[in-house]
Image: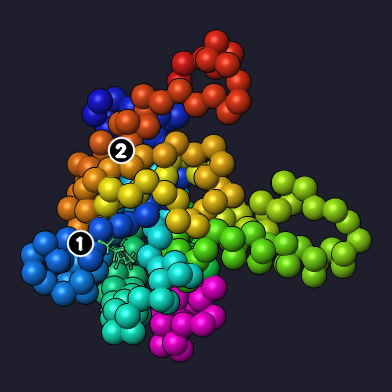
């Protein structure tokens, strides 16, 4: 199915991507793992452009998990520098294209240069009304839930019990549509502590393509696959009318 032929509800409102396989992509070329991350940023750029073109409302990219601190020190430092460079290089183009950029995760532990770039980028694009682009950095799904409950405890002064709707409003993804499609590249079939609450009813798409090879057509293929799925949300197939 072409992009044009898709009706509104066939295009997921919210896509999240676990961009896996940078290291293996580089190793296959006898290059350092960091070369894979550099190539990965270009693919992230392409995914953002494609999502905007397809009028996806929200795109969430898993750039750095709370567990990624366990990687070799040089790789972590390289990634931090790469985030700063990429952010500073792309922010004006993102802003010009009406993209609203937000970071999900505990960014307070990043170095001050990166924190500053994040803050400036978020402020600059805060009023934009196009694609909601979220970069999950130092993000973990369990952290998100615990953080949400803690924030709620502060606000409610512990007088109340929490329900699903309230908890959702405290998660880092509040104001975003429900997650429709979760993509993981690189051959592994797991969620790895990414958006674990939000993925409750998401369609999952796993592919073997390593992230630096995941181009615009690969994303369109994933969206086309999504368009063939019947989403039931616990109902029977008969109860759910065709999309
Ligand atoms: C996974 O590959 C990728 C990461 C740990 C995150 C880094 C992602 C990028 C640099 C691309 C996008 C960046 C931005 C700023 C949006 P891996 O190292 O786990 O690969 P492997 O499984 O082959 O070792």
Q: Residue furthest right?
A: 159
Range of magenta residues = 106-123
Location of the C terminus (image quadrant): top left
- Mark 1 CB near ligand 1 (8 Å cut): yes
Q: Which sits in the foreground, 116 or 136?
A: 136
Location of the N terminus (image quadrant): top left
Q: Callout 2 environment at 10 Å: few (<14), some (14 to 19), or many (20+)?
A: some
Which of the labelled discs sits on residue 24, or is there none?
1
Residue at horizontal 20%, vertical 58%?
Answer: 212
Q: Position of residue 167 (x, y in %)?
A: 71, 53
Q: Position of residue 211 (x, y in %)?
A: 24, 55
85, above or below 13, in the image = below
37, above or below 220, in the image = below
Q: Which sits in the foreground, 143 or 13?
A: 143
Residue at horizontal 77%, vertical 48%?
Answer: 163
> Helix, strand or loop at disc 2?
helix
Which of the labelled discs sits on residue 222, or is there none?
2
């Amino acid at each position: 199915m072409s992009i044009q032929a898709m009706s509104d509800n066939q295009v997921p409102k919210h896509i999240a991507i676990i961009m896996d396989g940078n290291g293996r992509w580089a190793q296959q070329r006898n290059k350092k793992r960091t070369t894979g991350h550099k190539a990965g940023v270009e693919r992230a750029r392409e995914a953002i452009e494609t999502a905007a073109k397809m009028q996806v409302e929200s795109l969430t990219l898993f750039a750095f998990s709370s567990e990624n601190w366990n990687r070799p020190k040089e790789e972590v430092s390289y990634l931090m520098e790469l985030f700063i460079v990429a952010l500073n290089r792309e922010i004006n183009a993102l802003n010009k294209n009406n993209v609203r950029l937000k970071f999900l995760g505990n960014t307070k532990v990043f170095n001050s240069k990166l924190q500053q770039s994040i803050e400036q980028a978020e402020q600059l694009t805060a009023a934009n009304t196009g694609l909601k682009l979220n970069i999950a950095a130092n993000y973990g799904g369990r952290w998100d839930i615990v953080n949400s409950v803690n924030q709620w405890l502060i606000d409610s002064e512990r007088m109340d019990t929490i329900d699903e709707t309230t908890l959702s409003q405290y998660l880092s993804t509040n104001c975003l549509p429900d997650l429709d499609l979760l993509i993981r590249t690189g051959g592994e079939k797991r969620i790895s502590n990414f958006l674990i609450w939000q993925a409750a009813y998401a369609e999952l798409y796993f592919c073997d393509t390593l992230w630096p090879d995941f181009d615009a057509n690969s994303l369109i293929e994933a969206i086309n696959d999504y368009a063939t799925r019947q989403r039931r949300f616990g109902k029977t197939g008969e109860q759910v009318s065709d999309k």
